[in-house]
Image (cartoon, helix red, strand yellow):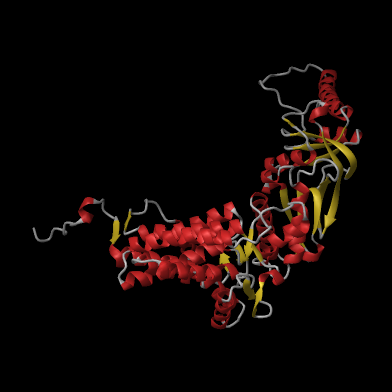
Amino acid sequence: MVGMSMQPYGIQSMLKEGYRHLSGLDEAVIKNIEACKELSTITRTSLGPNGMNKMVINHLDKLFVTSDAGTIVNELEIQHPAAKLLVLAAKAQQEEIGDGANLVISFAGELLQNAEELIRMGLHPSEIISGYTKAINKTVEILEQLVESGSQTMDVRNKDEVISRMRAAVASKQFGQEEIICSLVADACIQVCPKNPTNFNVDNVRVAKLLGGGLHNSCIVRGMVMKSDAVGSIKRMEKAKVAVFAGGVDTNATETKGTVLIHSAEQLENYAKTEEAKVEELIKAVAESGAKVIVSGGSIGEMALHFCERYKIMVLKISSKFELRRFCRTAGAVAHLKLSRPSPDDLGYVDSISVEEIGGVTVTIARNEEGGNSISTVVLRGSTDSILDDLERAVDDGVNTYKAMCRDSRIVPGAAATEIELAQRLKEYANAEIGLDKYAISKYAESFEFVPKTLADNAGLNAMEIIAALYTGHGSGNAKLGIDLEEGACKDVSETKVWDLFATKLFALKYASDAACTVLRVDQIIMAKPAGGPRRDAAAAAGAGAEED
């Protein structure tokens, strides 16, 4: 019959209905490169201290105003499979070092853009990949030669040394305020740094965001700041022992159901009294153990609170179990499951615990100055929520950089000095190569130029002049010549004190190259039909339509 639908042929006849199949250079490789280029175009303008902010509104209508590439790509919900590879590389960088996610995406995008030119010239993707692999191996070699001498060893408790390594990471998020933020973060990190710095735990530096005031009102608390009020009328305790109960402070219901028959009013009275006596006995036992503060992870009964007041015990409620664990770390306490007499070893200790009001918010501050400095909190002040969120990201980057420098303290020149030096040396290496790899290596070298170009563009400077001046300076042997964005000229980085961590650069370039090579290796895309059921955005659109009706 002629009316029958046409039978699928080729690869479509093998796959289930609804599959999409893209293959070949134009359909698969170039399309993938296009998607990655689009992604890197988004993040590129946010690179460096003068980077522009992006306003992202996610599917829950939450507003993000930030220039932090890690946050931007997280909230964008990217669908394209090739662009997702770049996002994964950026996430790996964010988790490994905490800074340099933008460099990963932008550099991978630049590599792929140059690869596209080579493909149009007639090179095969596998030749480009082999050239890029040689180039990254050579880059790692050169990068190790650029390490500033004497930076292999550092005292992680020396504030000036810490700030010099942290400044670049924080300035890329909060330019102009890096001095204040670095000083706060360095103090907080040094306070909680363990005897063996490689065991530094990022979770030990907390951030409390309180609206109002400005960044200059921010401070550091050795201990914890909780956004909650104390339960009861006692609001302050000095040099107190602390008992922590995870299950709550209340009369316990019995395990089994039972019925109590009461014949007279006296029996009823006695029954109520025994319950009262039992609660008093428990609270009295806690008071006798020396505890002056009870921290509860669950509900606090009226009767229990009454006896706590009578025995002059301060009561706090922390409903989050993670916060409760942190409090236990701060005070050195062991959490008990239910209300009982704590042993002396399980009690924690705080120098002072008080309820204070900061900018109209009631907070409970538990300080531990002498005792174990296991947790410190950076109290951030700012005028709006989005400013506070951005400040928090800058602090997180600073803390992650501290963790990275505890493991590897080597530094390389910042302000695009390293990139230009790498570009120059790689070009020399490419010229010495024979075979088709040399084209890929010289394109890899060219890709480094995007860093000074973008930094200059974002600062409103003439990129061509800056790059030419940098090449001239590096050609005459000054490997530390970088851009001074404030004066709009090229300066030695040892004067401007802009240093990047060696580990940040190394991982960023490695991840970017790996991601670019992975995208280039793909020559076919086979996509299944999405699973059934209404799509989330389609359902939302339908809901909006129904409301209008």
- The reply to whether residue 30 is in sight is yes
339 lies above or below 152: above
- The image quarter containing residue 135 is bottom left
Tell me if 468 is positioned left or right of 253 in this view: left
Tell me if 164 is positioned left or right of 128 in this view: right
Q: At which x and y percent is residue 543? A: 48, 60
List the single residue furthest toward the left.
1
Q: Residue at x 68, y 50 (%)?
A: 406
Q: At which x and y percent is residue 397? A: 65, 58
- The image quarter containing residue 22 is bottom left
Q: At which x and y percent is residue 60? A: 56, 59
In the image, 243 versus 117, the foreground residue is 117
Q: Residue at x 34, y 62 (%)?
A: 127
- The reply to whether residue 58 is in sight is no
In the image, 157 versus 374, the foreground residue is 157
Q: At which x and y percent is residue 150? A: 69, 58
In the image, 506 versus 529, the foreground residue is 506
Tell me if 13 is positioned left or right of 44 in this view: left
* Rendered-image quadrant of the N terminus: bottom left
Q: Residue at x 74, y 42 (%)?
A: 195
421 lies above or below 161: below
Image mark count: 0
